[in-house]
Structures are given as structure tokens and as C-alpha cells.
Image (spheres, rainbow, N blue to C red):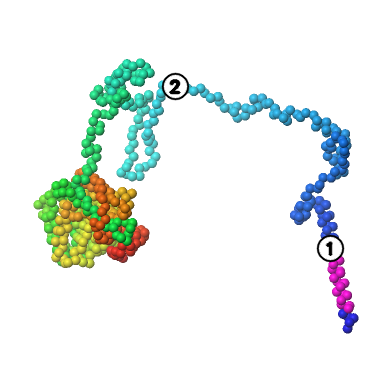
């Protein structure tokens, strides 16, 4: 059993020795091949990059022979092979060549003739002489459009063509006004003096014929020129502008409230009223009584509406004009145009009212748009009294669209005062339609028998206007936020108030009031000092409600989702209810 084990040990030791010998032999063979490959030049590109870098290595220079004490310099290159050396004679010849002087052409460029440098400049022409100008020749240009190549896009602003104008050669410049006597005195002075050196005939022509200035025109001292035409700055204010100052016509009172929880803002109310009964006279007006005669009105309510309309005819003042309109699917006018309140016209209007009957559908938007066809005289306020239940059943029936479309078409020219005849009337439509068009609205909730008294009371409030088309303008730098933006006209028997918010440290409120009093345009600037504590918290709540109304009216004109966010934010911050929630 021992012999086989010894045999196996010897056999393993022999295999290890053979493996070591094989590795050593392989290393020697690969090293020899690598040396051979680096020496040979195959001229192919399939060798590895490492081998190519070894072959491209620069061989070191070998010194074949060193000579001491000789001045000879080897300059030749081996002619053949690596071991060949140029003979000494050739080397000395190279030294002699180097000792000679360098060629002059290598040190300085040769001088070329002018013809060879001509190039492109040879075709350039010589500059011409500057022309002599003895007199000044003014430039004359006529700004005009000779060929019309674009059509006018706006018919109201059509392009006006002017005929071709012939140019005048040597036209004279515009000569300022001069004084004849001063020019005559300067004419006698020698040339080069302070005065003009002109012939006397030219002076006479310039002073009288060309300018037409008389001898009495004042002269600016030391210049010989007139200061201005006599009386140029003597105009009256009415001659310069048609706007009348109304600072003595109106008076404004301000009431302010500063909440403790809002350290940055305060709120104010400004009441505008006439300064005196005789200062601002009552304006003649145009009145439209428009009655809903659809089936939804019912004969019981329409009976009281007819009674109220006849009583309103008695409240039309002398100098006013009026018309009566009834509507169902379409509007029907009593007169084709405005008419004066004379016995004949009043009798005709009463007969038109008595024949009104309840039937058909309701087109509120089409009927209100019919009112815009009436001519409007500048300076005469137009008041429309709308009596309806506010329930459109034909045409444009969406309340927000009716408000937006009519307000955009009216643009504040017509004041709308709406009255609902039943407790279930469309208050959203009536209220916003009036708010966005310089008016107000209310609904009769006590019963149909109170309709005539309500109509007469409203007619009395708007019966005496004193200022129309009234607008208030606050400076952009004042940071005041004021509502309503579009106020009603100023009436003698109706209060006018605006609500605003401004920074707490403002101190003063400055605004401009612009309106029309008949044919005269009125203008005034108010400067009011703010006194916190003169008002109460109701001013703050009313301002928030006025802002919400304004935002609802703006949303009716343009469906902008950001306006809804502003409405909700204002209602949440000031803890007020949003009116007509869900109707817009």
C-alpha cells in the first residue's frame, strides 16, 4: 500500500516542474517576437497601438567620430546608410559657403515698380472738385402721398388726399414779425454792425408787405423784433376752453373710518351735492317710460302700472322731452321721436298707455336696445324708467349676457332706473342692469297696489338733474380704490355718494369731477382733508358691497374667472354676503 502513494507524489512533482518550464519558455518566445516586431516595418495599420507607438519612437543620435582641436565642422548628411560619413573636403566646402555674405533679397524685400502695385485701385476715379456755392439753397420737400396703396380700415377716419402742389424755386424762409421803426434805424448802420445790413426797399417790403405788422406793435428792447401780437395774452378763460369751473357750484363732504384691525387702510364716504339752490340750475331732460306688457305681468299688476305711468306724465317738467314704449317680443313707441309735454302729446300718450294689454313673451334685451336708437342731445340727461318683472322668455334670456351686452352698447349714455312689480321679480337682472348704467333698482314687495306710488316717487327723485355725464377721477398715485366707478348723474332730490379706500397715512383725498351742465362742460378739483373718526364701520361694509357689485358687473361683460376669485376673496375678508350667488 505504501508504494503506490510514493509513485503518486513523484508524479505530481514532475507536473509542477513541467508547468514552470513551459511558462518560462513561453515568456522567452514572446519577448523575442516583440523585439523582432519592433524592428521590422510591415507598412500596415493592423498592429496594436502600443506596438505602433514603440515603432514611432525616435532613435537617439549616435556619434561616429569625435575630433579634438580642429575647426572643421561636419555639415553633410550621410549619403548612404547609417554608417556613411561625408568626406572632409565636402565639409570644408560647406564652411566656405556659410562664411559668405547673405543674399540682399533675403534681408530686404525688392523694390517693385508702381505698375505692379496698382491692383484694384487702378480703376478708381479721381475725386471731383467741391462745387462752389455762393448762395444758400434751401431744401424743399413736400410731404404728401402721391399713390394710395392701402385702403382705409376705419370709415370714420378716411384718408384725405390733397392735390399735387408745384414746388416754388428759391422760396423765401418765414420771416418773424419785426418793427418798422427799429428796422429803419438799423438800416442806416454800417455793414457789420449789430443791426441787419439790408437795402431800404427790402426793409419796407419785409416790415409791411411780407408781415403786415403795423407801427404800433411793441418791440422787445434791444432786438428790433416784436414780442407778440397786441392782445395775444388778453383772452378770457371762456375763449380758451369750453370747460367751466364748478368749484362754486358743488360741495363735497368726507367721512372717514379707520378700523383697528387694518393698520394700513382707512375707508371714506364722499357726499356730493349742490352748493346752493340758485347756483346750479336744473337741466332739461329726456324721459322714456318703458312698460313690460307680456303675459307674465298679468292684468292685475298691469292695471296699477298703467295708473302709475299716467301719474308720471304729470311730473314731466316744462322744457323736457318724453316718449312712452311698451314691449313684448318687440318694442312699440308712442312717438317716433322725442316730443314736448304739451296737452296734445300728453293726451296721445295717455291713450297709448290705456290700450296696453298683457299678452305674449318678454324680450327685455331687444326692447332695451331699441332705446339706444333715440337721438341724444349733448348736455341733456336721458332717463329711462323700466317697469317689469324681469323675466325674459324670448331673445336673449341669460341675465348676465343681457347685463353685459346692453352695458357695453350703452356705455353710460342712458340712465336706467328699474322697478320690479312683484316680489319674485328677477332682482339680479334689474339691480345689475341699473347699477352698470348710472341708475338703481328696487322691487315692490308690499303689493301691487303700491306700484303707482313707487313709480311717482322714483320719477320725483330723478325729475331735477343738475349735472349729467358725471365722472370722478382720482390720481393713480393716490392709491385710492373708489366705487362705484360709473356714478349716476347729480340730481337735486337724490343723494350722490361714493365710497373709497386709501392708505392710512394719506392725509388728504384729491379728485376731479367732470360733467355737463347743458351746453357747458364743467370741471372741478376737490382737495379734502381726511379726519378719521368722522364715520362708522358701515362705510367699510358699504365699500366692500360696492366693490362686489362692480366685480359682478365686470364679470357680466367679460367672463373672466379671476373676477370670481376677487369676489370670493372680498366677501371672505369683509364678511359680507355675495348678492345673487349662483346667478352668475
Q: Which residue is found at the position 62% from the left and 27% from the top?
A: 118
Q: Which residue is found at the position 77% from the left and 50% from the top?
A: 56
Q: From the viewer's perspective, tell me whether residue 495 is left or right of residue 43.
A: left
Contact between marks 1 and 2 (CB within 8 A): the answer is no
Q: Earlier in the sequence, mark 1 or mark 2?
A: 1
Asked which secondary structure carries label 2, the reply is loop
Q: Position of residue 401 (x, y in %)?
A: 30, 59
Residue at which label 1 appears: 26
Q: Which residue is found at the position 35% from the left and 25% from the top?
A: 172
Q: Which residue is found at the position 73% from the left and 30% from the top?
A: 106
Q: Within the image, what quadrant is residue 50 found in?
A: bottom right
Residue 516 counted in the magenta span: no
Q: Which mark is residue 52?
A: none
Q: Residue furthest left?
A: 343
Q: Is residue 110 above or below residue 246?
A: above
Residue at which label 2 appears: 133
Q: Position of residue 360 (x, y in %)?
A: 21, 63
Q: Within the image, what quadrant is residue 141 found in?
A: top left
Viewer-closest of 304 and 3:
3
Q: Is residue 6 above or below residue 21?
A: below
Visible residue check, residue 426: yes
Q: CA distance from mark 1 to mark 2?
A: 105 Å
Q: From the viewer's perspective, tell me whether residue 115 is left or right of residue 372.
A: right
Visible residue check, residue 374: no
Majority secondary structure of magenta residues: helix
What is the magenta range?
Answer: 6-22
Q: Is residue 60 above or below residue 573?
A: above
Asked which secondary structure carries label 1, the reply is helix
Q: Nearer the viewer, mark 1 or mark 2?
A: 1
Amino acid at each position: 500500500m505504501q508504494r503506490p502513494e510514493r509513485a503518486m507524489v513523484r508524479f505530481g512533482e514532475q507536473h509542477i516542474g513541467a508547468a514552470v518550464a513551459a511558462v518560462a519558455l513561453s515568456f522567452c518566445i514572446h519577448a523575442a517576437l516583440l523585439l523582432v516586431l519592433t524592428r521590422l516595418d510591415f507598412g500596415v495599420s493592423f498592429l496594436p497601438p502600443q506596438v505602433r507607438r514603440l515603432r514611432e519612437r525616435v532613435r537617439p543620435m549616435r556619434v561616429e567620430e569625435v575630433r579634438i582641436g580642429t575647426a572643421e565642422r561636419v555639415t553633410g548628411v550621410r549619403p548612404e546608410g547609417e554608417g556613411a560619413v561625408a568626406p572632409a573636403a565636402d565639409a570644408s566646402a560647406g564652411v566656405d559657403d556659410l562664411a559668405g555674405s547673405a543674399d540682399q533679397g533675403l534681408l530686404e524685400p525688392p523694390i517693385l515698380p508702381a505698375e505692379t502695385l496698382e491692383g484694384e485701385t487702378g480703376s478708381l476715379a479721381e475725386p471731383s472738385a467741391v462745387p462752389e456755392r455762393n448762395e444758400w439753397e434751401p431744401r424743399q420737400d413736400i410731404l404728401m402721398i402721391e399713390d394710395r396703396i392701402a385702403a382705409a380700415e376705419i370709415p370714420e377716419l378716411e384718408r384725405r388726399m390733397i392735390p399735387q402742389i408745384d414746388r416754388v424755386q428759391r422760396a423765401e424762409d418765414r420771416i418773424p414779425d419785426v418793427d418798422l421803426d427799429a428796422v429803419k434805424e438799423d438800416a442806416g448802420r454800417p455793414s457789420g454792425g449789430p443791426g441787419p445790413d439790408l437795402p431800404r426797399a427790402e426793409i419796407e417790403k419785409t416790415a409791411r408787405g411780407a408781415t403786415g405788422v403795423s407801427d404800433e406793435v411793441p418791440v422787445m428792447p434791444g432786438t428790433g423784433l416784436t414780442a407778440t401780437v397786441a392782445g395775444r395774452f388778453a383772452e378770457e378763460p371762456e375763449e380758451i376752453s369750453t370747460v367751466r369751473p364748478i368749484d362754486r357750484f358743488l360741495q363735497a363732504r368726507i367721512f372717514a373710518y379707520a378700523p383697528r384691525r387694518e393698520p394700513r387702510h382707512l375707508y371714506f364716504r364722499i357726499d356730493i351735492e349742490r352748493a346752493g339752490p340758485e347756483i346750479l340750475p336744473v337741466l332739461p331732460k329726456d324721459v322714456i317710460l318703458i312698460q313690460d306688457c307680456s303675459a307674465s305681468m298679468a292684468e292685475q299688476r298691469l292695471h296699477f302700472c298703467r295708473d302709475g305711468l299716467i301719474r308720471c306724465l304729470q311730473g314731466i317738467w316744462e322744457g323736457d322731452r318724453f316718449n312712452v314704449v311698451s314691449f313684448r317680443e318687440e318694442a312699440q313707441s308712442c312717438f317716433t321721436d322725442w316730443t314736448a309735454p304739451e296737452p296734445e302729446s300728453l293726451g296721445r300718450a295717455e291713450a297709448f298707455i290705456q290700450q296696453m294689454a298683457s299678452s305674449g313673451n318678454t324680450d327685455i334685451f331687444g326692447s332695451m336696445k331699441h332705446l339706444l336708437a333715440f337721438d341724444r342731445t349733448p348736455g341733456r340727461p336721458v332717463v329711462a324708467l323700466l317697469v317689469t318683472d324681469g323675466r325674459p322668455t324670448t331673445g336673449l334670456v341669460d341675465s348676465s349676457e343681457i347685463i353685459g351686452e346692453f352695458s357695453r352698447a350703452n356705455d353710460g349714455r342712458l340712465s336706467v332706473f328699474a322697478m320690479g312689480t312683484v316680489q319674485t321679480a328677477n332682482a339680479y337682472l334689474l339691480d345689475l342692469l341699473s347699477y352698470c348704467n348710472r341708475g338703481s333698482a328696487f322691487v315692490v314687495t308690499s303689493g301691487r297696489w303700491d306700484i303707482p306710488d313707487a313709480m311717482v316717487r322714483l320719477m320725483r327723485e330723478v325729475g331735477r338733474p343738475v349735472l349729467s355725464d358725471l365722472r370722478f377721477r382720482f390720481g393713480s398715485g393716490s392709491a385710492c380704490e373708489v366705487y362705484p366707478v360709473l356714478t349716476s348723474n347729480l340730481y337735486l332730490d337724490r343723494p350722490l355718494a361714493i365710497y373709497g379706500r386709501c392708505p392710512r397715512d394719506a392725509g388728504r383725498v384729491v379728485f376731479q369731477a367732470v360733467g355737463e351742465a347743458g351746453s357747458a362742460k364743467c370741471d372741478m378739483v376737490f382737495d379734502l382733508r381726511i379726519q378719521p373718526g368722522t364715520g362708522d364701520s358701515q362705510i367699510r361694509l358699504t365699500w366692500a358691497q360696492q366693490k362686489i357689485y362692480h366685480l359682478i358687473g365686470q364679470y357680466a361683460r367679460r367672463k373672466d374667472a379671476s373676477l370670481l376669485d376677487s369676489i370670493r376673496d372680498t366677501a371672505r375678508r369683509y364678511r359680507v354676503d355675495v348678492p345673487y350667488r349662483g346667478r352668475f
